[in-house]
Image (cartoon, rainbow, N blue to C red):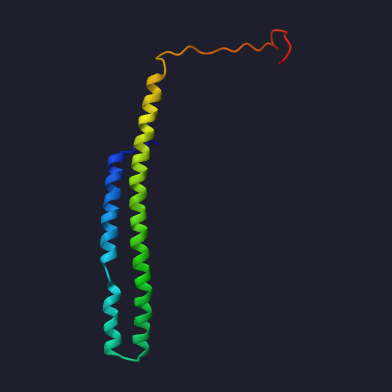
Amino acid sequence: MDIEVVPDRVRLAGQAMGEAAYGVGRVTPYDDLSEVGTALPGSTTAAAAEALAARWRVAMANWARATEVHGEALAVGAEDYRALESAVVGLLALTPPNPRPIHHRDSRAAGGAAA
């Protein structure tokens, strides 16, 4: 299985997640539920609408934060990948083109004492 990581695309995905987090944070579907209480004061429906609004308030805030954290993680991951890739390229540049195998002689095999 081949996997190709394109750090710039990962970074851009992180930015898109940040923009999405901002958008999610601005969505307030729970605000409209207050109209139920105004229209039906004291009703079971109004109480249920208020409970739903409270849950949505928390859920939307959590969703926005999770989206933001995911975007930040993508950005950090892209930079980490780029740094690791650069380090590997640097290490490979230090490797001789045709390294000679290193043969170790075991002194025990030649009749010597083990150290």
Seen at 34% across and 38% down, the residue is 5
List x then y, in percent, for residue 48.
Answer: 37, 83
**Relative to residue 108, is residue 38 drawn left or right?**
left
Residue 1, quarter of picture: top left
Residue 102, how many percent across, how many down? 54, 13
Compared to residue 60, the image places residue 111 above or below, namely above
Query: For residue 89, what is the image quadrant?
Result: top left
Q: Residue at x 33, y 52 (%)?
A: 71
Quarter of the rendering containing residue 108: top right
Q: Residue at x 26, y 78 (%)?
A: 32
Residue 45 in percent (x, y) is at 35, 86
Give above or below for 63 relative to 11: below
Q: Position of residue 23 (x, y in %)?
A: 25, 61
As drawn, 17 above or below 46: above
Q: Which residue is painted at 26% across and 89% down in the image?
A: 39
Which quadrant of the figure contains the C terminus?
top right
On screen, residue 81 versus residue 105, left or right, reads left
